[in-house]
Image (cartoon, grey):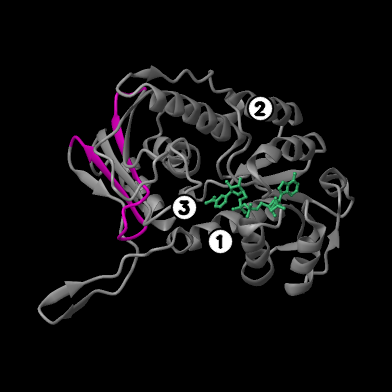
Protein backbone atom coordinates (compact mmCIF):
# COMPACT_ATOMS: atom_id res chain seq x y z
CA UNK A 1 0.00 0.00 0.00
CA UNK A 2 1.51 3.33 -1.07
CA UNK A 3 1.10 5.98 1.63
CA UNK A 4 0.52 9.27 -0.13
CA UNK A 5 0.96 12.90 0.90
CA UNK A 6 -0.97 15.44 -1.18
CA UNK A 7 0.22 19.02 -1.65
CA UNK A 8 -2.63 21.22 -2.91
CA UNK A 9 -6.32 20.51 -2.35
CA UNK A 10 -7.83 22.50 -5.20
CA UNK A 11 -9.89 21.17 -8.10
CA UNK A 12 -7.61 18.43 -9.39
CA UNK A 13 -6.08 17.66 -5.97
CA UNK A 14 -9.47 16.78 -4.52
CA UNK A 15 -10.37 14.74 -7.63
CA UNK A 16 -7.15 12.73 -7.26
CA UNK A 17 -7.74 12.22 -3.51
CA UNK A 18 -11.24 10.94 -4.30
CA UNK A 19 -10.04 8.51 -6.95
CA UNK A 20 -7.24 7.17 -4.72
CA UNK A 21 -9.71 6.76 -1.86
CA UNK A 22 -12.79 5.48 -3.69
CA UNK A 23 -11.82 4.05 -7.07
CA UNK A 24 -8.21 2.93 -7.28
CA UNK A 25 -6.38 0.23 -5.37
CA UNK A 26 -3.00 0.15 -3.66
CA UNK A 27 -2.86 3.71 -2.32
CA UNK A 28 -4.02 5.62 0.75
CA UNK A 29 -3.88 9.35 1.45
CA UNK A 30 -2.21 9.80 4.84
CA UNK A 31 -1.12 13.44 4.68
CA UNK A 32 -2.50 16.63 3.21
CA UNK A 33 -1.14 20.14 2.75
CA UNK A 34 -2.64 23.31 1.30
CA UNK A 35 -1.95 26.99 1.89
CA UNK A 36 -5.55 27.23 3.05
CA UNK A 37 -5.61 25.12 6.23
CA UNK A 38 -9.33 25.48 6.82
CA UNK A 39 -10.10 24.23 3.33
CA UNK A 40 -7.72 21.27 3.61
CA UNK A 41 -9.18 20.25 6.97
CA UNK A 42 -12.65 20.43 5.45
CA UNK A 43 -11.51 18.15 2.61
CA UNK A 44 -10.15 15.64 5.14
CA UNK A 45 -13.46 15.74 7.00
CA UNK A 46 -15.74 15.65 3.93
CA UNK A 47 -13.93 12.71 2.38
CA UNK A 48 -13.53 10.86 5.67
CA UNK A 49 -9.75 10.60 5.30
CA UNK A 50 -7.51 9.23 8.04
CA UNK A 51 -4.97 11.87 7.11
CA UNK A 52 -2.86 14.41 8.97
CA UNK A 53 -2.78 18.06 7.93
CA UNK A 54 0.67 19.59 7.47
CA UNK A 55 0.93 23.38 7.40
CA UNK A 56 4.35 22.99 5.78
CA UNK A 57 4.54 21.05 2.52
CA UNK A 58 8.21 20.23 3.03
CA UNK A 59 7.44 18.66 6.39
CA UNK A 60 4.86 16.51 4.61
CA UNK A 61 7.43 15.42 2.04
CA UNK A 62 9.80 14.29 4.79
CA UNK A 63 7.19 12.61 7.00
CA UNK A 64 8.22 9.02 7.78
CA UNK A 65 4.83 7.60 6.83
CA UNK A 66 4.73 9.30 3.40
CA UNK A 67 6.04 7.01 0.63
CA UNK A 68 4.97 9.14 -2.33
CA UNK A 69 4.04 12.78 -2.87
CA UNK A 70 1.25 14.05 -5.08
CA UNK A 71 1.92 17.64 -6.16
CA UNK A 72 -1.35 19.30 -7.16
CA UNK A 73 -0.91 22.88 -5.98
CA UNK A 74 -0.56 25.77 -8.42
CA UNK A 75 2.16 25.50 -11.07
CA UNK A 76 4.78 27.96 -9.72
CA UNK A 77 5.07 25.92 -6.48
CA UNK A 78 5.55 22.52 -8.18
CA UNK A 79 9.33 22.66 -8.56
CA UNK A 80 10.23 23.12 -4.89
CA UNK A 81 8.12 20.17 -3.77
CA UNK A 82 9.10 17.82 -6.60
CA UNK A 83 12.77 18.60 -6.03
CA UNK A 84 12.40 18.04 -2.31
CA UNK A 85 10.67 14.69 -2.86
CA UNK A 86 13.28 13.53 -5.38
CA UNK A 87 16.18 14.57 -3.14
CA UNK A 88 14.54 12.61 -0.32
CA UNK A 89 14.40 9.56 -2.64
CA UNK A 90 10.58 9.57 -2.65
CA UNK A 91 8.24 8.91 -5.55
CA UNK A 92 6.39 11.94 -6.83
CA UNK A 93 3.37 12.33 -9.09
CA UNK A 94 3.31 15.94 -10.26
CA UNK A 95 0.43 17.53 -12.11
CA UNK A 96 1.52 19.46 -15.16
CA UNK A 97 3.57 21.60 -15.36
CA UNK A 98 6.56 19.84 -13.81
CA UNK A 99 7.94 23.36 -13.31
CA UNK A 100 7.19 26.67 -14.96
CA UNK A 101 10.55 27.04 -16.75
CA UNK A 102 12.64 24.59 -18.76
CA UNK A 103 15.67 25.40 -16.54
CA UNK A 104 13.74 24.41 -13.41
CA UNK A 105 12.64 21.18 -15.08
CA UNK A 106 16.28 20.42 -15.88
CA UNK A 107 17.16 20.88 -12.21
CA UNK A 108 14.64 18.15 -11.39
CA UNK A 109 16.05 15.97 -14.19
CA UNK A 110 19.57 16.34 -12.73
CA UNK A 111 18.38 15.55 -9.21
CA UNK A 112 16.49 12.46 -10.40
CA UNK A 113 19.48 11.16 -12.37
CA UNK A 114 21.59 11.60 -9.23
CA UNK A 115 19.19 9.26 -7.42
CA UNK A 116 19.76 6.75 -10.26
CA UNK A 117 16.08 5.81 -10.31
CA UNK A 118 12.91 7.09 -11.96
CA UNK A 119 10.92 8.75 -9.19
CA UNK A 120 8.78 11.28 -11.04
CA UNK A 121 5.65 10.88 -13.14
CA UNK A 122 4.13 13.99 -14.72
CA UNK A 123 0.33 14.20 -15.02
CA UNK A 124 0.04 14.25 -18.80
CA UNK A 125 -2.88 11.83 -18.64
CA UNK A 126 -3.61 11.61 -22.36
CA UNK A 127 -0.86 8.98 -22.72
CA UNK A 128 -3.17 6.75 -20.65
CA UNK A 129 -6.32 7.50 -22.66
CA UNK A 130 -7.56 4.34 -24.41
CA UNK A 131 -8.08 6.23 -27.69
CA UNK A 132 -4.54 7.61 -27.86
CA UNK A 133 -3.12 4.25 -26.77
CA UNK A 134 -5.00 2.53 -29.63
CA UNK A 135 -3.87 5.20 -32.10
CA UNK A 136 -0.24 4.78 -31.04
CA UNK A 137 -0.53 1.01 -31.34
CA UNK A 138 -1.79 1.36 -34.93
CA UNK A 139 1.04 3.75 -35.84
CA UNK A 140 3.70 1.61 -34.16
CA UNK A 141 2.36 -1.50 -35.93
CA UNK A 142 2.99 0.28 -39.24
CA UNK A 143 -0.68 0.30 -40.25
CA UNK A 144 -0.44 3.69 -41.98
CA UNK A 145 3.25 3.50 -42.88
CA UNK A 146 5.53 6.35 -41.89
CA UNK A 147 3.57 9.34 -40.51
CA UNK A 148 3.93 12.42 -42.72
CA UNK A 149 1.44 14.93 -41.32
CA UNK A 150 -0.69 15.28 -38.22
CA UNK A 151 -3.78 17.47 -37.88
CA UNK A 152 -5.03 18.11 -34.37
CA UNK A 153 -7.67 20.31 -32.78
CA UNK A 154 -8.31 21.29 -29.17
CA UNK A 155 -11.67 22.99 -28.85
CA UNK A 156 -13.37 24.26 -25.69
CA UNK A 157 -16.94 25.55 -25.66
CA UNK A 158 -16.05 28.71 -23.78
CA UNK A 159 -13.43 30.30 -21.51
CA UNK A 160 -13.80 33.13 -19.02
CA UNK A 161 -12.25 36.60 -19.21
CA UNK A 162 -9.18 35.55 -17.22
CA UNK A 163 -8.05 33.31 -20.08
CA UNK A 164 -5.22 34.98 -22.00
CA UNK A 165 -3.58 34.24 -25.36
CA UNK A 166 -0.52 32.51 -23.85
CA UNK A 167 -2.79 30.18 -21.86
CA UNK A 168 -3.78 28.63 -25.18
CA UNK A 169 -0.28 27.17 -25.13
CA UNK A 170 0.52 26.74 -21.43
CA UNK A 171 -2.87 25.43 -20.28
CA UNK A 172 -4.52 24.06 -23.41
CA UNK A 173 -2.11 22.93 -26.11
CA UNK A 174 0.37 21.70 -23.48
CA UNK A 175 -1.47 18.35 -23.59
CA UNK A 176 -0.99 18.08 -27.37
CA UNK A 177 2.65 19.11 -26.94
CA UNK A 178 3.21 16.12 -24.68
CA UNK A 179 1.05 13.50 -26.32
CA UNK A 180 1.91 14.13 -29.99
CA UNK A 181 5.67 13.59 -29.77
CA UNK A 182 4.99 10.44 -27.72
CA UNK A 183 2.51 9.30 -30.36
CA UNK A 184 5.02 9.80 -33.17
CA UNK A 185 8.08 8.79 -31.14
CA UNK A 186 9.74 11.96 -32.41
CA UNK A 187 11.04 15.32 -31.23
CA UNK A 188 9.99 18.86 -32.07
CA UNK A 189 12.42 21.12 -33.93
CA UNK A 190 10.44 24.28 -34.74
CA UNK A 191 7.19 26.13 -34.09
CA UNK A 192 5.16 28.77 -35.88
CA UNK A 193 1.86 30.42 -34.96
CA UNK A 194 -0.72 31.97 -37.28
CA UNK A 195 -3.99 33.63 -36.36
CA UNK A 196 -7.14 33.08 -38.41
CA UNK A 197 -10.04 35.52 -38.32
CA UNK A 198 -10.96 36.12 -34.68
CA UNK A 199 -14.26 34.83 -33.30
CA UNK A 200 -16.66 37.48 -31.97
CA UNK A 201 -16.95 35.40 -28.78
CA UNK A 202 -13.33 35.98 -27.69
CA UNK A 203 -12.51 38.73 -25.18
CA UNK A 204 -10.51 41.76 -26.35
CA UNK A 205 -7.25 40.42 -24.93
CA UNK A 206 -7.57 36.92 -26.41
CA UNK A 207 -6.56 35.77 -29.89
CA UNK A 208 -8.96 32.93 -30.63
CA UNK A 209 -8.68 30.68 -32.62
CA UNK A 210 -4.98 30.07 -33.18
CA UNK A 211 -3.08 27.57 -35.31
CA UNK A 212 0.26 26.30 -34.07
CA UNK A 213 2.43 24.52 -36.60
CA UNK A 214 5.24 22.34 -35.36
CA UNK A 215 7.83 20.36 -37.28
CA UNK A 216 9.50 17.23 -35.92
CA UNK A 217 13.02 15.88 -36.31
CA UNK A 218 11.77 13.25 -38.79
CA UNK A 219 10.06 15.99 -40.83
CA UNK A 220 6.45 15.38 -39.77
CA UNK A 221 4.36 18.56 -40.07
CA UNK A 222 1.89 19.02 -37.24
CA UNK A 223 -0.84 21.62 -37.13
CA UNK A 224 -2.83 22.17 -33.95
CA UNK A 225 -5.97 24.29 -33.99
CA UNK A 226 -6.68 25.81 -30.59
CA UNK A 227 -10.19 27.22 -30.43
CA UNK A 228 -11.39 27.88 -26.91
CA UNK A 229 -14.70 29.61 -27.63
CA UNK A 230 -16.00 27.16 -30.22
CA UNK A 231 -19.40 27.08 -28.46
CA UNK A 232 -20.54 23.60 -29.47
CA UNK A 233 -18.51 21.33 -27.16
CA UNK A 234 -15.20 20.06 -25.81
CA UNK A 235 -13.75 18.38 -28.84
CA UNK A 236 -10.34 16.78 -29.26
CA UNK A 237 -9.27 15.71 -32.73
CA UNK A 238 -6.20 13.96 -33.98
CA UNK A 239 -5.65 12.65 -37.49
CA UNK A 240 -2.33 11.12 -38.51
CA UNK A 241 -1.62 10.97 -42.24
CA UNK A 242 0.86 8.29 -43.19
CA UNK A 243 2.38 6.92 -46.41
CA UNK A 244 -0.12 4.05 -46.55
CA UNK A 245 -3.22 5.42 -44.84
CA UNK A 246 -4.75 7.75 -42.29
CA UNK A 247 -5.43 6.96 -38.61
CA UNK A 248 -7.88 8.86 -36.41
CA UNK A 249 -8.23 9.29 -32.67
CA UNK A 250 -11.47 7.47 -31.74
CA UNK A 251 -14.45 9.62 -30.77
CA UNK A 252 -15.68 9.20 -27.17
CA UNK A 253 -18.31 6.47 -26.87
CA UNK A 254 -21.65 8.29 -26.93
CA UNK A 255 -24.98 6.93 -28.07
CA UNK A 256 -26.04 7.61 -31.63
CA UNK A 257 -29.75 8.17 -32.21
CA UNK A 258 -31.67 8.12 -35.48
CA UNK A 259 -34.88 10.06 -34.99
CA UNK A 260 -37.12 12.61 -36.71
CA UNK A 261 -35.18 12.41 -39.95
CA UNK A 262 -31.91 13.16 -38.15
CA UNK A 263 -28.82 11.31 -36.98
CA UNK A 264 -27.75 12.63 -33.56
CA UNK A 265 -24.78 12.01 -31.32
CA UNK A 266 -24.01 14.09 -28.23
CA UNK A 267 -20.68 15.88 -27.87
CA UNK A 268 -19.14 16.29 -24.40
CA UNK A 269 -19.08 19.81 -22.98
CA UNK A 270 -16.66 19.40 -20.05
CA UNK A 271 -12.96 18.50 -20.40
CA UNK A 272 -13.18 16.64 -17.09
CA UNK A 273 -15.52 14.08 -18.66
CA UNK A 274 -13.41 13.57 -21.78
CA UNK A 275 -10.37 12.14 -20.00
CA UNK A 276 -11.92 10.91 -16.78
CA UNK A 277 -10.81 7.31 -17.31
CA UNK A 278 -7.29 8.38 -18.29
CA UNK A 279 -6.88 10.12 -14.91
CA UNK A 280 -7.77 6.86 -13.18
CA UNK A 281 -5.46 4.80 -15.37
CA UNK A 282 -2.44 7.12 -14.99
CA UNK A 283 -2.65 7.15 -11.19
CA UNK A 284 -3.36 3.43 -10.97
CA UNK A 285 -0.24 2.79 -13.05
CA UNK A 286 1.78 5.02 -10.70
CA UNK A 287 0.54 3.07 -7.65
CA UNK A 288 0.96 -0.34 -9.29
CA UNK A 289 4.52 0.36 -10.35
CA UNK A 290 5.49 1.48 -6.86
CA UNK A 291 3.76 -1.49 -5.22
CA UNK A 292 5.25 -3.98 -7.68
CA UNK A 293 8.71 -2.46 -7.67
CA UNK A 294 8.51 -1.96 -11.45
CA UNK A 295 9.77 1.21 -13.16
CA UNK A 296 7.34 4.12 -13.55
CA UNK A 297 5.97 4.05 -17.12
CA UNK A 298 4.34 7.48 -17.45
CA UNK A 299 5.65 10.84 -18.66
CA UNK A 300 9.05 11.49 -17.08
CA UNK A 301 10.84 14.57 -15.80
CA UNK A 302 12.49 14.71 -19.22
CA UNK A 303 9.04 14.86 -20.84
CA UNK A 304 8.19 17.65 -18.40
CA UNK A 305 11.32 19.51 -19.57
CA UNK A 306 10.55 18.90 -23.27
CA UNK A 307 7.00 20.20 -22.80
CA UNK A 308 8.15 23.30 -20.91
CA UNK A 309 10.78 24.21 -23.50
CA UNK A 310 8.41 23.60 -26.43
CA UNK A 311 5.68 25.65 -24.77
CA UNK A 312 8.14 28.53 -24.22
CA UNK A 313 9.02 28.57 -27.92
CA UNK A 314 5.33 28.39 -28.93
CA UNK A 315 4.55 31.39 -26.69
CA UNK A 316 7.40 33.31 -28.32
CA UNK A 317 6.03 32.27 -31.73
CA UNK A 318 2.64 33.71 -30.73
CA UNK A 319 4.32 37.08 -30.39
CA UNK A 320 5.88 36.83 -33.88
CA UNK A 321 3.04 35.52 -36.04
CA UNK A 322 4.22 33.66 -39.11
CA UNK A 323 7.83 33.39 -37.96
CA UNK A 324 9.34 29.90 -37.62
CA UNK A 325 11.27 29.59 -34.36
CA UNK A 326 13.68 26.75 -33.53
CA UNK A 327 13.00 24.37 -30.64
CA UNK A 328 16.41 23.37 -29.34
CA UNK A 329 16.06 20.57 -26.82
CA UNK A 330 19.14 19.32 -25.05
CA UNK A 331 20.36 15.82 -25.94
CA UNK A 332 18.17 13.32 -24.10
CA UNK A 333 20.26 11.45 -21.50
CA UNK A 334 20.43 7.63 -21.76
CA UNK A 335 18.61 7.50 -18.40
CA UNK A 336 15.40 8.74 -20.08
CA UNK A 337 15.57 6.80 -23.36
P1 LIG B 1 -6.67 25.08 -8.03
O1 LIG B 1 -8.06 24.63 -7.99
O2 LIG B 1 -6.34 26.55 -7.99
O3 LIG B 1 -5.90 24.36 -6.82
C1 LIG B 1 -4.62 24.64 -6.40
C2 LIG B 1 -4.63 24.43 -4.89
O4 LIG B 1 -3.32 24.52 -4.39
C3 LIG B 1 -5.47 25.50 -4.17
O5 LIG B 1 -6.16 24.91 -3.10
C4 LIG B 1 -4.38 26.46 -3.69
O6 LIG B 1 -4.81 27.23 -2.57
C5 LIG B 1 -3.29 25.49 -3.33
N1 LIG B 1 -1.96 26.07 -3.31
C6 LIG B 1 -1.48 27.13 -4.02
N2 LIG B 1 -0.17 27.32 -3.73
C7 LIG B 1 0.18 26.38 -2.82
C8 LIG B 1 1.37 26.08 -2.12
N3 LIG B 1 2.48 26.82 -2.31
N4 LIG B 1 1.36 25.03 -1.28
C9 LIG B 1 0.26 24.28 -1.09
N5 LIG B 1 -0.93 24.53 -1.71
C10 LIG B 1 -0.96 25.56 -2.56
O7 LIG B 1 -5.93 24.52 -9.29
P2 LIG B 1 -6.17 23.11 -10.01
O8 LIG B 1 -7.10 23.29 -11.15
O9 LIG B 1 -6.44 22.06 -9.01
O10 LIG B 1 -4.72 22.89 -10.64
C11 LIG B 1 -3.61 22.46 -9.88
C12 LIG B 1 -2.51 22.01 -10.84
O11 LIG B 1 -3.01 20.91 -11.60
C13 LIG B 1 -2.11 23.07 -11.86
O12 LIG B 1 -0.74 23.02 -12.07
C14 LIG B 1 -2.86 22.69 -13.12
O13 LIG B 1 -2.20 23.07 -14.30
C15 LIG B 1 -2.92 21.17 -12.98
N6 LIG B 1 -4.11 20.60 -13.65
C16 LIG B 1 -3.91 19.60 -14.53
C17 LIG B 1 -5.00 19.04 -15.20
C18 LIG B 1 -4.80 17.94 -16.19
O14 LIG B 1 -5.63 17.80 -17.07
N7 LIG B 1 -3.77 17.14 -16.07
C19 LIG B 1 -6.28 19.51 -14.93
C20 LIG B 1 -6.44 20.52 -13.99
C21 LIG B 1 -5.35 21.05 -13.35
P3 LIG B 1 -5.52 28.67 -2.86
O15 LIG B 1 -6.76 28.36 -3.64
O16 LIG B 1 -5.80 29.18 -1.51
O17 LIG B 1 -4.54 29.49 -3.65
Q: Nearer the viewer, mark 1 or mark 2?
A: 2
Residue on which the image places disc 1: 280
Q: Earlier in the sequence, mark 1 or mark 3?
A: 3
Q: Is residue 17 magenta?
A: no
Tell me if 256 is positioned left or right of 88 in this view: left
For the C terminus, the image quarter is top right
Left or right: 221 as drawn, with respect to 308: left
260 w.r.t. 272: above or below = below
- Closest to the camera, between mark 1 and mark 3, is 3
User: The N terminus lies in which quarter of the figure?
Assistant: bottom right
Q: Nearer the viewer, mark 3 or mark 2?
A: 3
Q: Is mark 1 within 8 Å of ligand 1?
A: no
Label 2: which secondary element: helix
**Residue at disc 3, secondary structure:** loop
Tell which circle, 3 or 2, labels the residue nearer the N-terminal end.
2
Q: Give the CA separation, mark 3 to mark 2.
A: 29 Å
> Which label belongs to residue 160?
3
**Range drawn in magenta:** 217-243
Q: Residue furthest front?
A: 204
Q: Residue at x 69, y 40 (%)?
A: 78
Mark 1 is surrounded, within 10 Å at the Cα level, by few (under 14), some (14 to 19) or many (20 or more) other residues, namely some
Q: Residues within 10 Å of mark 3 (few under 14, many from 20)?
A: few
* Residue 297, image x, y percentages: 57, 45
- Dot label at residue 104: 2
Left or right for 78, reference 324: right
Q: Residue placed at 61% from the left, 70% from the top?
A: 23
Q: Looking at this view, is 295 or 156 the one in front?
A: 156
Q: Residues under labels 1 and 3: Cα distance?
A: 28 Å
Amino acid sequence: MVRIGVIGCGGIGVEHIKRITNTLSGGVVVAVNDINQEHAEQVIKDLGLQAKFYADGHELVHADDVDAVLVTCWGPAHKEYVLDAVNAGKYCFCEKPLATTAEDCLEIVEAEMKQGKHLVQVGFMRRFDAGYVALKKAIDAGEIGAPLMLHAAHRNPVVDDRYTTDMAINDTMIHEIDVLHWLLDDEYVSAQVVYPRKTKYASDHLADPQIVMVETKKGVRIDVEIFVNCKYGYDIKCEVVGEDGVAYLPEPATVQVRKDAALKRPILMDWKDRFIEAYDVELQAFLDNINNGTPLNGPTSWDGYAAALTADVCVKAQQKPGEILPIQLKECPEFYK
